[in-house]
Image: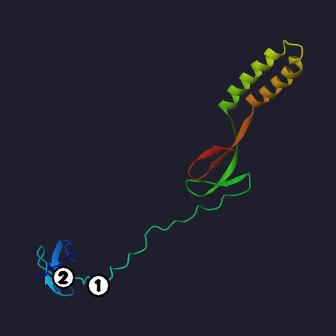
Amino acid sequence: MPAIAYLRTDCEHCGGHIEYPSELAGQSIQCPHCQQTTSLPSPFMPPPPIPPPAVVYSPPPPQSRNPNHAVCPHCQSQMARTKRKESNITLQVLGVVVFLVGLGLCFTLIGAIIGIPLMIVAARMGFSKFPVMACSRCGYYYKI
């Protein structure tokens, strides 16, 4: 006696699982879960095509090359350079360390030649300020 092959599918109406013998493929039956008529797919029918994804990737808008204007990463509006300037705490700490090294080198014969310019560079580094770009729409800002 040949073995009967069973196939599986889901009801078109309620999504309930239906297991059926392959001889019933292509016919319509009453769903045992919701009692509505549903058609059983043939084992040789290709599955329905998968729809394309709903979300499509779009690249971010191009950034402005003008150093006085940029595009806000949050609201995509134009950002402008402000009069406000901020310092960088990392450069200030590094400037103090380099200044102290330069000061220590000043007490040696050859170190004075290196120490004094090093102290000048450290002072410029520690007191440097950077312009700030600000978005007029959302308030986002960053240092250039």
Label 2 crowding class (10 Å Cα cut-off): few <14, some 14-19, many 20+?
some
Q: Image point 78% across, 26% down: which residue?
A: 122
Inspect the image, locate mark 1, and give the three-letter code of the amino acid beneath it: Phe
Inspect the image, locate mark 2, and give the three-letter code of the amino acid beneath it: Ser
Residue 89's place in the image compared with 79, above or below, is: above
Left or right: 77, with 129 as reference point: left
Quarter of the image that includes the C terminus: top right
Instruction: Looking at the image, tell me whether mark 1 or mark 2 is earlier in sequence order.
Output: 2
Q: Image point 49% across, 68% down: which residue?
A: 56
Quarter of the image that includes the N terminus: bottom left
* Residue pointed to by mark 1: 44
Secondary structure of residue under mark 2? helix
Q: Image point 79% across, 15% down: which residue?
A: 104
Checking the image for residue 139, the label placed there is none
* Residue pointed to by mark 2: 22
Left or right: 42, with 23 as reference point: right
Residue 30 quadrant: bottom left
Between residue 20 and residue 82, name the one nearer to us: 20
Label 1 crowding class (10 Å Cα cut-off): few <14, some 14-19, many 20+?
few
Left or right: 143, with 118 as reference point: left
